[in-house]
Amino acid sequence: FFRIALAYSGRQEIADAAKKALTKDGEITPETISKNLYTDAPDPDLLIRTAEQRISNFLLWGSAYMEMNFSKKLWPDFTLSDYKKALTDFDARQRRFGKY
């Protein structure tokens, strides 16, 4: 999946999912939150952030084990070569998913 988010709030998505979970499922658990998010897309493996080093309220729920790549370039200047470099960097990482 390739996602670009406009006018999106991770906090609002979690709040909306909690409301739906309570209404539909009668309880709020990690599982009921996950199934009531805006999309059923899998959690992202990699976030490529251009221009700044912050996640800016983006995909907060799904970012638990997400790897991050930061580029100083602005989005309009980010090239296919930059994208390939980010993927190569990601591929070289040893993902531990919160385990040491």
Image: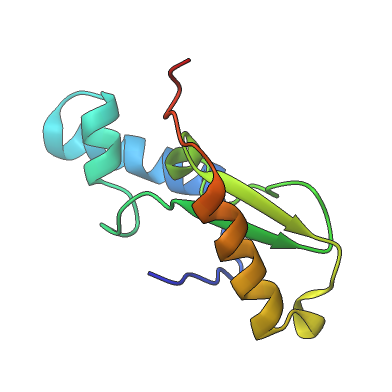
Image quarter (top left, top right, bottom left or bottom right) of the N terminus: bottom left
Q: Whole-percent x and y of residue 76?
A: 78, 84
Q: Residue at x 68, y 48 (%)?
A: 55
Which of the two residues, 97 or 34, is positioned nearer the viewer here?
Answer: 97
Identify the image's colour scheme: rainbow, by chain, secondary structure or one colour: rainbow
| Left or right of residue 8, residue 69 in this image | right
Q: Residue at x 32, y 38 (%)?
A: 19
Which of the two residues, 38 or 26, is positioned nearer the viewer here?
Answer: 38
Quick check: 71 above or below 30? Answer: below
Residue reaching furthest to the left: 25
Q: Whole-percent x and y of residue 42?
A: 30, 53
| Left or right of residue 65, residue 88 in this image | right
Instruction: Tally the numbered discs.
Output: 0
Quick check: 63 above or below 49? Answer: above
Q: Quadrant of residue 6?
A: bottom right
Residue reaching furthest to the top: 100
Which of the two residues, 100 or 60, is positioned nearer the viewer here?
Answer: 100
Q: Residue at x 28, y 40 (%)?
A: 34
Residue reaching furthest to the front: 92
Q: Quadrant of residue 84?
A: bottom right
Q: Residue at x 76, y 76 (%)?
A: 75
Q: Whole-percent x and y of residue 51?
A: 83, 63
Q: Whole-percent x and y of residue 65?
A: 46, 36
Quick check: 50 above or below 56? Answer: below
